[in-house]
Amino acid sequence: MSSKYSGLKIFHYQDKLDTLEKTKSEISAPIHIRIKPTNVCNHNCWYCAYKSDDLQLGQDMVEKDYIPEQKMMEIIDDCKDMGVKAITFSGGGEPFTYRYFQQTIEKLIDKKIAFASLTNGSKLNGEIAELFAKNATWLRVSIDGYNDESYAKARDVKEGEFSKIINNMKEFTNIENRTCNLGVSFIIDATNYTKIYQFCELIKDIGVDSIKLSGCVVANDGNENNKYHEPFFNEAKELSQKVKNELEDENFEVFDSYHYLEDKFDKDYTWCPYSQILPVIGADLNIYPCQDKAYNLDNGLVGSIKDKRFKDFWFNDKDKFFKINPSKDCQNHCVANGKNQMILDYLDAQHLGFV
């Protein structure tokens, strides 16, 4: 089965790889952009990286921030002009609470830019659900609870929210002419690991196309995260593998990403290729190198587009992409770490004929 989660997609963009290094004068457009349209969220997850005092992500986030409608339309126009291939919406806040989300999606459809979103699924209904079902590439719902009681406790919401979201997803899968891949990200923690298989059976039964299993991040330090997961790691891993072995088929992809986290934290390289491939536009109109440095102004800020167009910012001064030194500034969780290592290995390869 081909994987929607493959880390090798960048190698389909040879031209982009050839412009990444500082020694190359050319600056090429990002391939993919993550936009955080609003910092408002209607859930309050206990492990939320944007609200937890134990995590650096979101340390400078202002909850009331959102991208004004006119600025969002300008960003999309620029992305079209630049040749950006795809846009993903995520938090900060819950993208579906963004007051101009439908106008944004309609603009992307008109401009023929591929789009996707992360969501808690609570507002996945009505016209916006129809637009996503028939036009988006993918949609991924983040879930931690396994029933109404556990979900309400984990997210500080009223009981019944879990059932509502399950029903929203079920109805989404039944929308006529749906082409959007619906996935779920199940966040494994000490309260839900015994329910991994049971939950995945439920998700498959309602018609979800894929599931990603990954551990919650509770600290900036990899060892601290591993210490949290250690008491139940083996049992959780066994269940995640059982899901992969028994439930995956041609209609249901299982991406087992549950593992100890050292490889997401430790970095020995001095520049970040992915800051030029998949940057983040925050609701504060600042540009960040990745989702794991978003709203971190001390050592995660690439620049601002508050008073300039995104395309003008991007193509001016390549040095901005090299201000952040991952070996010093990014000793935190980093989803792009493995991809960065592959790219740097590719760029540094010698004796090329001896394959």
Image (tube, rainbow, N blue to C red):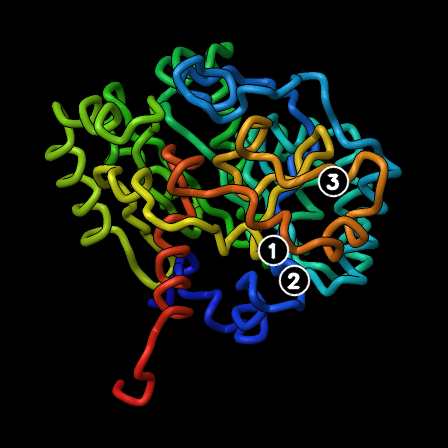
Residue wearing tag 3: 127
Mark 3 and mark 1: Cα distance apart in space:
26 Å
Q: Position of residue 209 (x, y in %)?
A: 43, 52
Q: Is residue 260 visible?
A: yes
Residue wearing tag 1: 32
Which image quadrant for residue 331? top left
Contact check, label 1 and label 2, Cβ < 8 Å: yes
**At x 54% / y 24%, what residue is drawn?**
58
| Amino acid on which disc 2 is placed | Lys
Residue closest to the far bottom: 353
Q: Which of the marked residues, 3 or 1, is nearer the chain's N terminus? A: 1
When the figure is inspected, residue 20 is found, relative to residue 305, above or below; the finding is below
**At x 71% / y 28%, what residue is drawn?**
284
Give the numbered dot on residue 80: none
Residue closest to the far right: 70
When the figure is inspected, residue 144 is found, relative to residue 6, above or below; the finding is above
